[in-house]
Image (tube, rainbow, N blue to C red):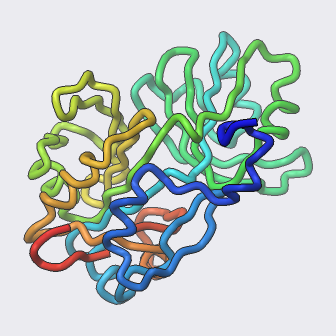
Amino acid sequence: MTAADPRLHYETPLKPTPFHPRTAALNRMNDWGPWGGYTTALSFDDTVMEYTAIRNAASVYDLCPMVKYRITGPDAAGYLNRLTLRNAAKLPVGSVHYTAWCDDQGQLLDDGTLFRLGPDDFRLCCQERHLPWLLDSAVGFDVALREETEDIAALSLQGPCAASVLAAAGFDVSALKPFRMAQFAFDGRQPDRFAHRIHRRSGIRAVDRYPPRPALVGSAVRGRRPAGPAPHRIDGAEPRAAGGGVHHHQHGLHPGPSGGA
């Protein structure tokens, strides 16, 4: 058996995210923990500075561990209408909305974001793994479901200066409306990455096909001065979630030295 053999998963109980080299370089506290089977930063430096950056400038954090499901087929919208609390049929192609789903007794299972990539093509992004429930709920619907967590890398850039940071990194998102998606080329490559704006001033999330280039993070971080972003972690995200604004699924990246990352 080789190291790639899935039966040897116990040899690497936690995977590094594709952005781990960048987060490790910024992690002054060398404080790590598990999130969804990945190694993620629990602390970088100073919680107050991270919170301040989210509220007043910009912050970036690694969303790769968030679970992503692809749902396709002629009954995809009808299936999602049964599964989730919002009307997926009304979600335009190229748009995103927040939603949640319950079991048959009305118990909340999880919440997340639903992306409509095509008329019969959706991506569901959430905190926990739900594939057995999704498959059970798909009985009677002409849909195909698969987990694509390891196929999709993701970053979240949030704060009032988020769009300015992306502009400095070469991504013009000025025309990107809240809860809409756009596609951008990077580093001379074909446009295989997407961004969606959460709120007009609060944040932007970018996703990339594996293997993502760490230069994508580097461009955002190098473009941060003087506005940000500050990498942030779980403790920096929780106070902001408690204080209102965009819902966070925690974890992230923190401020590098003034000379850049």
Horizontal side of residue 251 vs 26, given as left or right: right
Q: Looking at the image, is 243 positioned above or below residue 77? A: below
- Residue visible at 37% across and 48% down in the picture: 205
Where residue 260 sits: x, y (%)?
A: 14, 69
Where residue 14 sits: x, y (%)?
A: 64, 59
Residue closest to the eye, 30 or 147? 30
- Residue visible at 14% across and 60% down in the picture: 222
Q: Looking at the image, is 159 positioned above or below residue 12? A: below
In the displayed image of the protein, which residue is found farthest to the front? 1
Q: How many marks?
A: 0
Horizontal side of residue 208 vs 134, given as left or right: left
- Residue visible at 32% across and 75% down in the picture: 254
Q: Where is residue 83, by image quadrant? A: top right
Horizontal side of residue 69 vs 50, given as left or right: right
Where residue 166 sits: x, y (%)?
A: 18, 50
* The C terminus - image quarter: bottom left
Where residue 199 sits: x, y (%)?
A: 33, 53
Horizontal side of residue 225 vs 72, given as left or right: left
- Residue visible at 56% across and 20% down in the picture: 121
Say if residue 242 shows up in the picture. no
Residue closest to the eye, 90 or 143? 143
In the displayed image of the protein, which residue is found farthest to the right? 105
